[in-house]
Image (cartoon, grey):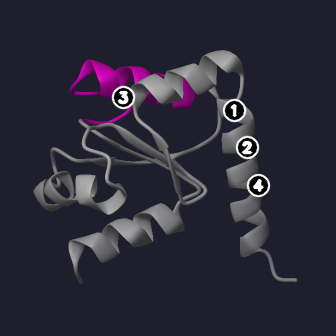
Amino acid sequence: MDVLEVIKEQVEGNPIIIYMKGSPDVPSCGFSARASQALKACGVPFAYVNVLANPEIFQNLPRFANWPTFPQIYIDGELVGGCDITLELYQSGELKPMMEQAAAKAEGAGEAS
C-alpha cells in the first residue's frame, strides 16, 4: 500500500490523531511535547504516530496536507494544524469541544442503526 494511502487511512480511521516526534509520554521535541500535552489536557483519547519511528511517514506526511512541519494534528479527518494553532485552540477553550465532538461522532458511526 502506498504511504499516502496509509496516512489517509490513519487520518480517516481515528477521530483525533497527532503525527509527532516521539510519543505523548516521551516526546522527542518541544513542539510535539506542547501539542500532545494540550491534547492530553482535554481528557479525550487520541491516537498518535511517532514519525521518527516511521521514516516513510516522516518524509511523506508534509505532502499529504501540504503542511511542512511536525507535529500535525488531525481532528475528524481534517488538519487542525501544528503546535501553535493547537495551543491557541486549547487556550481559547475551543480544542476540547472539537475533540469531544469528533470522538462522539466516531462512536456514533460505530453503532448499528
Mark 3 — residue?
25
Q: Relative to the observer, which residue lies in front, 85 or 26?
A: 85
Amino acid carrying label 2: it is Glu
Mark 2 — residue?
100
Q: CA distance from mark 1 to mark 2?
A: 6 Å
Circles 3 and 4: CB distance less than 8 Å? no
Q: Earlier in the sequence, mark 4 or mark 1?
A: 1
Q: Is residue 90 above or below residue 100?
A: above
Q: Is residue 91 above or below residue 111?
A: above
Nearer to us of marks 1 and 3 is 1
Q: Earlier in the sequence, mark 3 or mark 4?
A: 3
Would you identify the image quadrant in which residue 25 lies?
A: top left
User: In what element is the residue under mark 2?
Assistant: helix
Q: Relative to the observer, which residue lies in front, 38 or 70?
A: 70
Mark 1 — residue?
96
Q: Earlier in the sequence, mark 2 or mark 3?
A: 3
Quarter of the figure that contains the N terminus: bottom left
Q: Which residues are magenta?
A: 22-41
Mark 4 — residue?
104
Residue at position x 26%, y 38% from top? 69
- Extreme residue toward the front, this view: 66
Q: Is residue 54 left or right of residue 20?
A: left
Q: CA distance from mark 4 to mark 2?
A: 6 Å
